[in-house]
Image (spheres, helix red, strand yellow):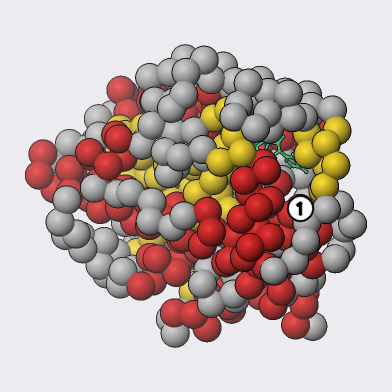
Amino acid sequence: MEATHLINQKNILVTGGAGYIGTHTLVELLSSGCQVVVIDNLSNASRKALRRVEMITGKTVTFIKGDVRDRTLLRSAFQGYEIDAVIHFAGLKSVNESVEDPLNYYDNNVTGSLALIEVMSEFGCKTLVFSSSAAVYGDPANVPVNERESLSPTTPYASSKLMVENILRHVHVSDPAWSIAILRYFNPVGAHVSGLIGEAPNGMPSNLMPYVSQVAHGKYQKLKVYGDDYDTPDGTGVRDFIHVSDLASGHTAALEKLFCSSLSTDQGEILTLNLGTGRGYSVLEVIDAFQKASGRLIEYEVVERRPGDAAKSYADTSLAFDLLGWTAKHDINRMCQDSWRWQSMNPEGFESDK
Ligand code: NAD
Ligand code: WQD
């Protein structure tokens, strides 16, 4: 699909925009000529990340510190800026934490989304991109997973994402003027090529790529590989790792599509799309690629499987290609190179430049 640049000059509200995927998407939005307003409560992010986005793009990010569950704050944002569309990243994302504290996860992820949708509706802003997750598929029966696969979330986190998906589908049925893209991300990794923004987990990372990066950097001695007896080519888990900058460009492509359909039909639409590369890599393949990218040895030991892990999950990405003309461009080597650059330049995340 030809880039139509319908998003040029649009005002986009980005909730959770100071976070990992949010900051990379801000770079794409600003580079596409959008103005951005970020609402973030900084529960898992730093104000410094937004300054780095400004350094990369040479453009200004308008920042409102606050919580998406706060309707008064949301209303003041819509009153202060003529918002054309919203990208809704704000939420909590740790699978383990969600098992320990489900109410907090439902409150943040579901109540926060409800407040946002209500206030958008009050202000007649009906164009929304929502961050969902491949977690809604649970342990998929078929790979590559397409969007019609049965949905069986196995954790409060995944369940909170599916609840919001369903709310959005019902909102669209009740008012077809809404233009909504539900994007199911697979495994976002990597960092902006500048090394200025990237993933900055609090404490010990639970995800593979940040853990591998920190082992390469010497913060942890060795990686635990969770099981090598899966039904996969080398026995370790297989995932669809996608470069965060590719994921970010998927958001601008989705917004273009939403603006395009509402222009041409006077009606909105609801899209549900996987964002992945369509290619799975095993844990051992990731270790190998990271060793090459970093020139460091990654020590590891194989331990028991992690409860709840799927053997393999990778996306059928044909729908995103057919509808958005979008496809991921960066391979696993590039993902590891960019993760390593970010890790080396910012060993303590955004606190490195204190
Ligand atoms: P992140 O934690 O880096 O970013 C989320 C941002 O939202 C943070 O800046 C946090 O401070 C903010 N936030 C959280 N709750 C808020 C609230 N109630 N009000 C205002 N701000 C709030 O996470 P991310 O990796 O950038 O993920 C962004 C979105 O994508 C999340 O909704 C996440 O569930 C979803 N997602 C992430 C992944 C992944 O592996 N990173 C995969 C699939 C889906
Ligand atoms: C990948 C592979 C592990 C760590 C999670 C969420 C999902 C989504 C993305 C938000 C698996 C193995 C990992 C380690 C290991 N997030 N591994 N040693 O579990 O696919 O997805 O992040 O929506 O909802 O569940 O990602 O990076 O944790 O694991 O061997 O120290 O690496 O067993 O096979 P996962 P991950």
Task: Classify residue 49 by image quadrant.
Answer: bottom right
Above or below, 240 relative to 103: below
- Front-lying residue, 155 or 330: 330
Q: Residue furthest right?
A: 221
Q: Secondary structure at mark 1?
A: helix
Q: Answer with left or right where residue 241 lies relative to residue 209.
A: left
Image location of residue 153, percent across then percent down? 60, 21
Q: Amino acid at mark 1?
A: Tyr
x 22%, y 38%: residue: 322
x 44%, y 69%: residue: 27
Task: Work out whether residue 67 can be spotted.
Answer: no
Question: Looking at the image, how many numbered discs can be counted on the residues?
Answer: 1
x 89%, y 57%: residue: 221
Task: Work out whether residue 4 can be spotted.
Answer: yes
Q: Answer with left or right where residue 164 lies relative to residue 307.
A: left
Tell me the crowding category of disc 1: few under 14, some 14 to 19, or many 20 or more residues within 10 angstroms, Cα based: some
Q: Quadrant of the C terminus?
A: bottom right
- Front-lying residue, 146 or 299: 299
Image location of residue 229, percent across then percent down? 73, 24
Above or below, 177 relative to 149: below
Q: Answer with left or right where residue 142 lies relative to residue 291.
A: left
* Ligand 2 has an atom within 8 Å of the beta carbon of the residue at disc 1: yes
Image location of residue 150, percent across then percent down? 47, 15
Residue at the spot of label 1 = 211
